[in-house]
Image (cartoon, rainbow, N blue to C red):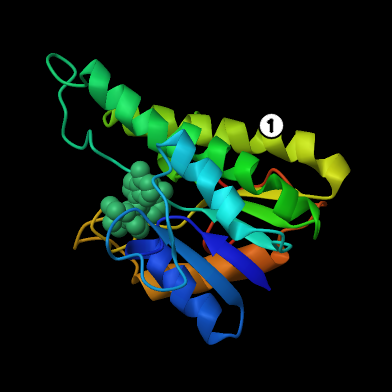
Amino acid sequence: MRVLITGANRGIGRALLDGLDARGDRVTGTARGADAGPGWLRVDVADPASVAAMGRAFGEEPLDLLVCNAGVYPDKGQRLADGYPAGLWAETFAVNVTGVFLSVQALLPALARRRGKVAILSSRMGSQALAPGGSLIYRASKAAALNLGRNLAAELAPEGIAVGIYHPGWVRTAMGGAAADLDPAVAAAGLMARFDALSLATTGCFEDHAGRAILL
Ligand SMILES: NC(=O)c1ccc[n+]([C@@H]2O[C@H](COP(=O)([O-])OP(=O)(O)OC[C@H]3O[C@@H](n4cnc5c(N)ncnc54)[C@H](OP(=O)(O)O)[C@@H]3O)[C@@H](O)[C@H]2O)c1
């Protein structure tokens, strides 16, 4: 399977790259920094020119699976009274929402060549039903990523492209923190099974690494 993963230099993206690579899939990772090694694409998903260049650099190959994994969570611990500055909203949405859209748009020709699949890493924190307050920017951005994924699922179904939206679990990464439940390799193994199971029959699904449906 030919796969591209955004933000694959560390965390869940890295674990996915390693897991897919180990089972024989051909995976291209993207990184925005110097850790983009040989064969990697250097991409900042918040920069439209950079994402368009990713589409061109991927070339004429067919793509079986695009994993929109790159994400940020910069408003952890912000207070409603004096936090959540406008710049943080813009920065977060540029990566977590616009970055997902631009990545899909740039790789649509490659996905269409194979009737490929799109996997979007949202979060349980993007659920409308489970809305306890706190982390208002991150929650809104992941809700928007979920909404984007479900609308793309409808738009892309006639082209044979399935779109799944996922919560990876609470994972021990820089974002998830040391107290999180899951090792990245365990989350990645679960997500890989979810991506394999994704089809036009299940397009638009919102589920966790173990396949449990999450309330919208
Ligand atoms: N960890 C969890 O418990 C958890 C739970 C729910 C959802 N998620 C979601 O899962 C995904 C991966 O999370 P993680 O825990 O692995 O996070 P992480 O360890 O913080 O890694 C984030 C990755 O995204 C990349 N990234 C950030 N901004 C970018 C940009 N503008 N352009 C390109 N790449 C960018 C980072 O690259 P740099 O190294 O350059 O910063 C890094 O590779 C995210 O979408 C996150 O919201 C995570």
Q: Is residue 6 left or right of residue 148?
A: left
Residue at the spot 12% in from the left edge and 15% down from the top edge: 82
Residue 6 vertical placement versus 96 (above, below): below
Give the residue at mark 1.
151
Q: Position of residue 214 (x, y in %)?
A: 55, 45
Q: Is residue 114 left or right of residue 213?
A: right
Report which quarter residue 158 is drawn in.
top right
Residue 167 vertical placement versus 93 (above, below): below
Q: Position of residue 98 (x, y in %)?
A: 49, 32
Residue 178 vertical placement versus 140 (above, below): below
Q: Position of residue 136 (x, y in %)?
A: 31, 26
Extreme residue toward the left, this view:
82
Q: Nearer the viewer, residue 170 or 71?
A: 71
Residue at the spot 71% in from the left edge and 65% down from the top edge: 197
Q: Is residue 130 visible?
A: no
Residue 72 vertical placement versus 33 (above, below): above
Q: Position of residue 59 (x, y in %)?
A: 65, 58
Is the N terminus in the top left, top right, bottom left or bottom right quadrant?
Answer: bottom right
Extreme residue toward the top, this view:
81
Q: Nearer the viewer, residue 165 or 34?
A: 34
Is the C terminus in the top left, top right, bottom left or bottom right quadrant?
Answer: top right
Number of marks in picture: 1
Q: Badge 1: how crowded within 10 Å, few (<14), some, or many (20+)? A: few
Q: Is residue 123 visible?
A: yes
Q: Is residue 34 left or right of residue 196?
A: left
Amino acid bearing label 1: Asn
Could you say whether the residue bearing mark 1 is in a helix, strand or loop?
helix
Residue at the spot 21% in from the left edge and 37% down from the top edge: 76
Disc 1 within 8 angstroms of ligand 1 (CB): no
Residue at the spot 72% in from the left edge and 59% down from the top edge: 60
